[in-house]
Amino acid sequence: MPPRSTRTPPPVWGAAQDGPDRWTVTQRLDGNSPGNTIDLRYDFTLDGGQISRLVIAP
């Protein structure tokens, strides 16, 4: 059986408020899988203090 891929989430790279209820957070993940490193962007919208929309994309 091949070894399992592991990724260790590091601290958040950055966060920006895109509007009164919209945020973008960026993060880099490093691991031992093909491609090894990926930069992710989390775009989310808050509604009443809770996440009502979340998009995760490279």
Image: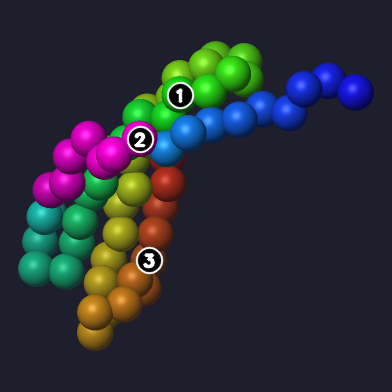
Residues at discs 2 and 1 in contact (Cβ within 8 Å): yes
Residue 23 appears at what percent x and percent y? 20, 56
Residue farthest to the bottom, as pictured: 48
Q: Earlier in the sequence, mark 2 or mark 3?
A: 2
Residue placed under numbered mark 1 in the picture: 30
In-front residue for pair 10/50: 10
Quarter containing the C terminus: top left
Query: In which quadrant of the rendered image does the N terminus lie?
Result: top right
Q: Relative to 9, does residue 32 appear above or below in the rendering?
A: above
Assign a secondary structure to mark 3: strand
Give residue 27's quadrant in the image.
top left
Is residue 12 covered in magenta? Answer: yes
Task: Kindly identify the amino acid type of the residue bearing the numbered disc 3.
Answer: Arg
Q: Which residue is mark 3?
A: 53
Q: Residue at x 61, y 30 (%)?
A: 6
Q: Label 1: state its secondary structure.
A: strand
The segment highlighted magenta reads: 10-16
In the image, is residue 7 above or below residue 57? above
Task: Answer few, some or many: residues within 10 Å of disc 1's Cα (few below 14, many 20 plus, some between 14 and 19).
Answer: some
Query: Which percent across, then down, holds residue 36?
Result: 52, 16
Residue 53 in view of the camera: yes
**Residue 10: image tag:** 2
Residues at marks 1 and 3, CA–CA distance in whole angstroms: 26 Å
15 versus 29 height, above or below? below
Question: The residue under label 2 is which amino acid type?
Answer: Pro
Quote the CA–CA distance across marks 2 and 3.
Answer: 23 Å
